[in-house]
Image (cartoon, helix red, strand yellow):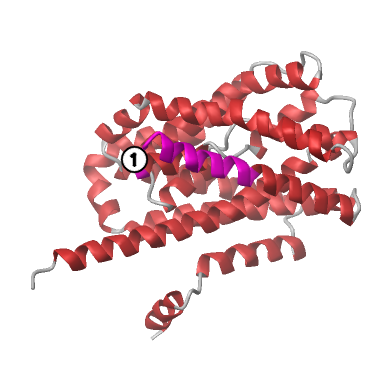
Amino acid sequence: MSGSLLVKLKGAGFDLYLVLLIATVALASLLPARGAAVGLLSMATYAAVALLFFLYGARLDTAAVVAGISNLRLQGMVLAATFVAFPIVGLILSALAAPWLPPELILGVMYVALLPSTVQSSIAFTSIAGGNVPAAVCAASVSNLLGVVLTPVLVAWLLHAGSGGSFDLSAMLDIGIQILLPFVVGQLVRPFIGGVILRHPKITRVVDRGSILLIIYGAFSAGMVSGIWSQVDRGVMAAIVIVDIMMLAVVMGGTWLAGRLMRLPPKDGIVLLFCGSKKSLASGLPMANILFAGRPVGLIVLPLMLFHQIQLFACAIIAERQARRLQAAKLNDMAIDEPG
């Protein structure tokens, strides 16, 4: 009964995942992770992400992985969106917002635009939306690794923050252990368990959506515990949110349009949309402490904190709707192919 009720609700436009997203935000606002719970949450999120990439590796054909890595046009477009188009949009919006926001927050808006793409959520959203996951793994990982070098260089050049920042080998190692190692292990055991994973797609679906919910809860909890939301008044907070939404909307619209103009296959267009329009909180916060030492880092990273949560929320909704459209298209194709 409950299964048929859920199907009817979905047909009426009910989106369970959206409800879970809102519930996660509410939970983090009312009961944010504190003390020892922060460590447990961090370990749970780390394990969920590692499991997710193990499942990706176990279900993906190795030939598809090689094709994703060798798709130089797509990889180049993602990097151009992240480190060229995004900074240009950030410069324009920073100049427009300068009369309404204090200098530290304008600096923070520009800093958002200079960061690399996320790794975990970009790939998870690509998977949810039915995109080219092997290409997303490559694009997001390369963006994050290059960002360790490119972001400090861009900050020093565009924001005159000095030459601080160094090549963070530990960040590379962490990405390798959490993302690439489970993926490679999954590829190695694919001949043994790949069939089971493919026959039970709900396993991967639960893990990728669950990892996103954990990331959202952790991000909102950190903001609540640090009191970052109370450091500015409501008017300034609203202005930052508007600027962040505009920046995300312009870049997402631009990447979608670029994919259409360049006639990318639909699955590659999804990669460009999600990997080219995201910014990494995990990379941005540690680098900010180095690049802006001696400045009010809490205020500078506020636009990043808000942007991170806006992008997770928006992309989760877009990815889920894209997945539903793909499922509907498959059902239509099956109906057309039926005889009679």
State yes or no: residue 250 in magenta.
Answer: yes
The quarter of the image holding the N terminus is bottom left
Q: Residues within 10 Å of mark 1 (few under 14, many from 20)?
A: few
Viewer-side residue, 235 vs 21 = 235
Residue 95 is at least partly visible in this image: yes
Q: Position of residue 103 (x, y in %)?
A: 89, 33
The quarter of the image holding the C terminus is bottom left
Residue at 33%, 64% (x, y): give it. Answer: 328
Q: What type of secondary structure mainly makes up the magenta span?
A: helix
Residue labelled with disc 1: 265
Q: Position of residue 87 (x, y in %)?
A: 67, 29
Q: Is residue 160 left or right of residue 54?
A: right
Image label count: 1
- Residues drawn in magenta: 248-266
Secondary structure under tag 1 reads loop
Q: Residue furthest top?
A: 163
State yes or no: residue 12 in magenta.
Answer: no
Viewer-side residue, 31 vs 4 = 4
Viewer-side residue, 290 vs 191 = 290
Residue 176 is at least partly visible in this image: no
Residue at 35%, 31% (x, y): give it. Answer: 68
Residue type pointed to by label 1 = Pro
Q: Position of residue 224 (x, y in %)?
A: 79, 54
Residue at 52%, 65% (x, y): give it. Answer: 17
Q: Residue furthest bottom?
A: 1
State the image quarter where residue 5 is shown. Answer: bottom left
Q: Is residue 288 left or right of residue 15?
A: right
Q: Position of residue 187 (x, y in %)?
A: 31, 36
